[in-house]
Image (cartoon, rainbow, N blue to C red):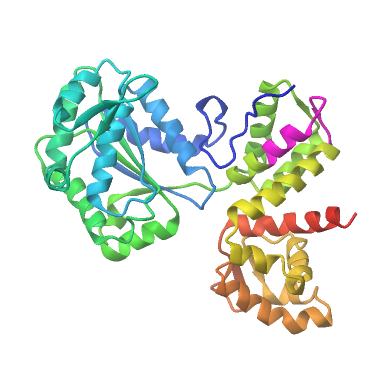
């Protein structure tokens, strides 16, 4: 009986199951190598929601710690909208992620007035400073980072600081100015600080940062994460299922690529559903169809905004959606080409459909006349799922 799925829908991928992203890893590791040699580097890991930014950042942290003898700190900033709270989380993660490290006592000694040891099941630490103290730490963040590195430089070659989920900070001018000052002060100093800033965010967050501080555009090297290609997707499923001793038919692998579109979030949702659907450790097309149906329902409920979900499920627009989905469109499509596939009643509501999809941010107008773009890969792929759900439910 199966006890544990190797897939992790909605969560970063465990190191042992990370597959692909060779080009992106090489680019980040090239920058990290420069840091280990004494430079300061800045990277913006950019990609759509569900593309695997957090998983890749976590894997890179593992690699730089293992191969480059650096200290990695991965800070999740969900819900944070002030520099003070960001700094508090950074220091808290520095302490927590190094509690098993022999260097921990050296780092902890710098914050002895603010650190509490807590925990019912083993000892952990918590950084606790009041508002006035946090403001002082913000103003002196570079000297603080220098002191941390001085404590560990006999054994470590640098620091990688990953700032993930920056939604609440991206529009804040203070955040963008903080990053600019951090980078420029180190660059103009005679005393190098080998630290790498790695920010993770969707393209819109980077644009918001640039809108309040134009220098952000020059500071960060952009590494864009695209959906996995067909070979990467097939290798992903083969690797994970093989580790579990499960065989998967070649025809199924092609089907899984078609419905996941190489989007890691969907790869895991589909893989997880199929894993639990299979009963004999041989995944057939029938197993895959059942799993895809299950995953489609989960994806609609978990990831689509309720307004989007309601509109996509509307009887009024369903047949139009199906014809778009079966037209093998990419991220863009031409209104004229889709219009030729519609019947008279569908044509009457087609303009209303397009306006509604734009209003709820499923679609936007393209650069060419009559061109439309999907706001993200998830919407496009879900439209492929929807006809399968209806077909199965009508049986």
Instruction: Name which residue lies at 39% across and 37% down.
Output: 28
Quarter of the image with the C terminus in it:
bottom right
Q: Is residue 96 left or right of 229 when viewed as pictured?
A: left
Q: Is residue 127 visible?
A: yes
**Residue 105, position in %: x, y?**
21, 19
- Residue 34 appears in the figure: no
Residue 304 colored magenta?
Answer: no
- Quadrant of the image occupied by residue 126: top left
Residue in view at x 15 percent, y 24 percent: 109
Which quadrant of the view contains residue 391?
A: bottom right
Q: Which picture quadrant has residue 231?
A: top right
Residue 278 covered by magenta stretch: yes
Residue sitting farthest toward the top: 102
> Residue 128 appears at what percent x and percent y?
22, 37
289 on left or right of 380: right
Task: In the rendered view, tell whether residue 189 sits above or below residue 296.
Answer: above
What range is drawn magenta here?
270-284
Q: Residue furthest right?
A: 395
User: Can you give x and y, in whole percent of width and height, for residue 331 in the image?
Assistant: 62, 61
**Residue that extends furthest to the front in the rendered view of this protein:** 120
- How many numbered marks, from 0 up? 0
Screen quadrant of the N terminus: top right
**Residue shown at 37%/57% (left/top)?**
206
Q: Is residue 361 above or below residue 298?
A: below
Q: Position of residue 5 (x, y in %)?
A: 65, 29
Vertically, is 283 above or below 164? above
Residue at the location (62% across, 37% down)? Answer: 232
Q: Is residue 367 left or right of residue 26?
A: right
């Amino acid at each position: 009986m199966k006890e544990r799925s190797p897939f992790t829908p909605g969560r970063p991928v465990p190191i042992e199951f990370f597959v692909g992203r060779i080009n992106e890893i090489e680019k980040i590791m090239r920058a990290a190598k420069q840091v280990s040699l004494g430079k300061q580097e800045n990277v913006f890991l950019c990609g759509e929601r569900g593309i695997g930014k957090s998983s890749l950042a976590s894997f890179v942290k593992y690699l730089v710690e293992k191969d480059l003898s650096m200290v990695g700190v991965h800070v999740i900033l969900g819900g944070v909208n002030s520099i003070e709270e960001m700094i508090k989380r950074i220091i808290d993660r520095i302490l927590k992620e190094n509690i098993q490290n022999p260097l921990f006592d050296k780092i902890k000694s710098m914050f002895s007035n603010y650190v509490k040891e807590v925990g019912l099941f083993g000892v952990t630490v918590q950084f606790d400073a009041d508002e006035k103290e946090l403001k002082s730490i913000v103003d002196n963040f570079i000297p603080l980072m220098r002191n941390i590195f001085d404590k560990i430089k006999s054994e470590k070659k640098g620091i990688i600081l990953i700032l993930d989920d920056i939604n609440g900070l991206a529009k804040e001018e203070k955040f963008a100015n903080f990053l600019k000052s951090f980078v420029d002060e180190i660059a103009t100093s005679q005393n190098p600080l080998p630290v790498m800033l790695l920010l993770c965010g969707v393209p819109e967050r980077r644009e918001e940062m640039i809108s309040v501080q134009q220098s952000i555009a020059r500071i960060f090297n952009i590494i864009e994460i695209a959906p996995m290609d067909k070979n990467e997707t097939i290798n992903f499923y083969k690797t994970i299922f093989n580790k579990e001793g499960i065989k998967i038919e070649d025809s199924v692998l092609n089907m899984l690529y078609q419905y996941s579109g190489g989007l890691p979030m969907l790869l895991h949702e589909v893989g997880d559903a199929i894993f639990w659907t299979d009963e004999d450790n041989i995944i057939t097309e029938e197993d895959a169809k059942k799993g895809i149906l299950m995953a489609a329902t989960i994806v609609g409920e978990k990831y689509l905004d309720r307004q989007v979900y309601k509109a996509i499920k509307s009887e009024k627009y369903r047949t139009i959606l199906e014809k778009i989905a079966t037209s093998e469109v990419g991220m863009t499509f031409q209104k004229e080409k889709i219009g030729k596939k519609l019947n008279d009643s569908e044509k009457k509501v087609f303009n209303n459909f397009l306006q509604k999809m734009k209003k709820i941010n499923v679609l936007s107008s393209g650069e060419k006349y009559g061109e439309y773009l999907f706001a993200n890969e998830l919407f496009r792929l879900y439209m492929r799922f929807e006809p399968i759900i209806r077909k199965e439910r009508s049986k």
